[in-house]
Image (cartoon, rainbow, N blue to C red):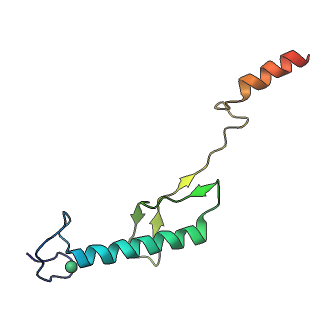
Amino acid sequence: MLCSNCNQDAEVLADDGRCVDCRIESEERRFEIIELAREQRQEEGFVEIDDDARLSEGNDNGCYVGAWVWVNFADTKFDKEMEEKSENEIAQH
Ligand SMILES: [Zn+2]
């Protein structure tokens, strides 16, 4: 069987048709890109990047990395403290 990436003969191929060496290599690259994304973009509590974040890479000199972006509910219709707040306000008056 030939690896779909390096075309070397391999005894075992992964589901995506790549040999073990290519898989390890691309996993290491993936991990390094995620590390780089964290250095450049991660902000504790605001932008978080998982170890298994999705990458979207085209021909440009960089790529997109899936991240968690914190959304603040305060003073919106999703505010979870709104009910408590209004109860406290009623109690104060
Ligand atoms: Zn290969």
Q: Is residue 25 above or below residue 52?
A: below
Q: Is residue 24 above or below residue 15?
A: below
- At x 75% / y 24%, what residue is drawn? 84
- At x 71% / y 37%, what residue is drawn? 74
82 relative position to 33: left or right: right
45 relative position to 50: left or right: right
- At x 79% / y 21%, what residue is drawn? 86
Number of numbered callouts drawn? 0
Quadrant in the picture for the C terminus:
top right
| Place of residue 36 in the rendered image (x, y in percent of width and height, measured from the top left) | 53, 73
Of residue 45 and residue 12, the one placed in the foreground of this image is 12
71 relative position to 50: left or right: right
Quadrant in which residue 53 is drawn:
bottom left
Quadrant in which residue 3 is drawn:
bottom left
Q: Seen from this angle, which residue lies furthest left?
A: 1
- At x 73% / y 27%, what residue is drawn? 82
| Place of residue 80 in the rendered image (x, y in percent of width and height, measured from the top left) | 67, 30
| Place of residue 51 in the rendered image (x, y in percent of width and height, measured from the top left) | 46, 61
Quadrant in which residue 27 is drawn:
bottom left
| Place of residue 42 in the rendered image (x, y in percent of width and height, measured from the top left) | 60, 63
Q: Quadrant of ligand 1?
A: bottom left
90 relative position to 60: left or right: right
Q: Is residue 87 above or below residue 48?
A: above
Q: Seen from this angle, which residue lies furthest right?
A: 93
Quadrant in the picture for the N terminus:
bottom left
